[in-house]
Image (spheres, rainbow, N blue to C red):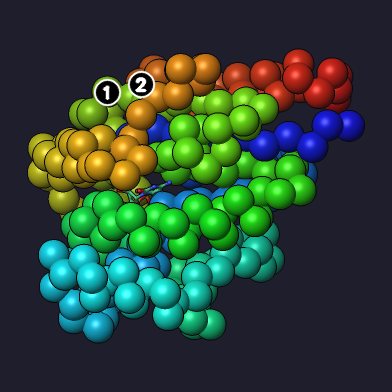
Amino acid sequence: LKKLVIAIDGPAASGKSTTARLIAERLGYLFVDTGAMYRAMTFKVLEQQLPLDDVEAIARLAERTEIQLRHQNNQLRVFLDGRDVTSEIRSPRVTRAVSAVSSIKQVREMMVREQRRMGEKGRIVLEGRDIGTEVFPDANLKVYMTAEVFERARRRQKDLQQQGIGVPVDELAREIADRDRKDSEREVSPLRQAPDAIVLDTSNMTIDEQVETIVRKVRSLTGSVS
Ligand code: DC
């Protein structure tokens, strides 16, 4: 059986993470949420109160930082220098600052190195912004997931509501559009659709349909019928 690398990229809140996790579960693959790694680095920058425009200081800090993803009880947990920061990295403060931190070359180099190491043996689904373009340009399957911005904002609103947080949908749409713009316009490996990626517009798709579509593609690559 081939040991595949599956790359899923796309804009913010397009359902990459949920879909990638479920695909990995179905296939018995490892799931890697690369955004969580950039979020963990951002959390450290904020905690150390470094100004977001101090590129040099952030680059130096990145060299002294260890970010690890661990799978525990069927959950992906994020460790920053040995400490579990899985919930902390989802705060609005981190979300607002993450595009700035992830635009720094040295930060990306460190993350990409770790991501390639995790993917060496294959049987892995990675999701992010630059997986198919930069991290694994030779990935066996590349998917570019997207959805209309208001649909993404509505989904994000629903997630937040479940955590008891109410945010107006247009505010979320603005934040999402703003982050997409920053992630697409940065100099170092910006968010781009790889030329050989399959585009999946999920605006009118359920999670099940998204998972099924991708799993079917993987099966056609491996020749497996189950
Ligand atoms: O997927 P997410 O929303 O958790 O990602 C958070 C941010 O991290 C995203 O706005 C840009 C950055 N990121 C990146 O630059 N490259 C990746 N491969 C993944 C995320």
Q: Position of residue 154 (x, y in %)?
A: 26, 35
Residue located 25% across and 83% down the image: 48
Q: Which mark is residue 203?
A: 2
Q: Quadrant of the C terminus?
A: top right
Q: Quadrant of the N terminus?
A: top right
Find numbered disc 2 in the image and state the secondary structure of the residue it sits on. Answer: loop
* Residue 32 relative to residue 183: left or right: right
The mark nearer the N terminus, 1 or 2, is: 1
Residue located 57% across and 38% down the image: 136
Q: Dot 2: within a 10 Å radius of its alpha carbon, few (fewer than 14), some, or many (20 or more) residues?
A: some
Q: Which mark is residue 125?
A: none
Find numbered disc 1 in the image and state the secondary structure of the residue it sits on. Answer: loop
Q: Position of residue 162 (x, y in %)?
A: 35, 54
Residue located 23% across and 70% down the image: 56
Q: Are marks 1 and 2 in contact (CB under 8 Å)?
A: yes
171 vs 12, nearest the viewer: 12
Q: Dot 1: within a 10 Å radius of its alpha carbon, few (fewer than 14), some, or many (20 or more) residues?
A: few
Q: Which residue type carries mark 2?
A: Ser
67 vs 74, nearest the viewer: 67
Rendered image quadrant of residue 38: bottom left
133 vs 152, nearest the viewer: 133
Rendered image quadrant of residue 69: bottom right
Q: Position of residue 68 (x, y in %)?
A: 55, 69
Query: Can residue 75 be seen in the rendering of this structure?
Result: yes
Residue located 25% across and 42% down the image: 187
Q: Which residue type carries mark 1?
A: Glu
Above or below residue 117? Residue 152 is: above
* Residue 15 relative to residue 48: left or right: right
Residue denoted by label 1: 148
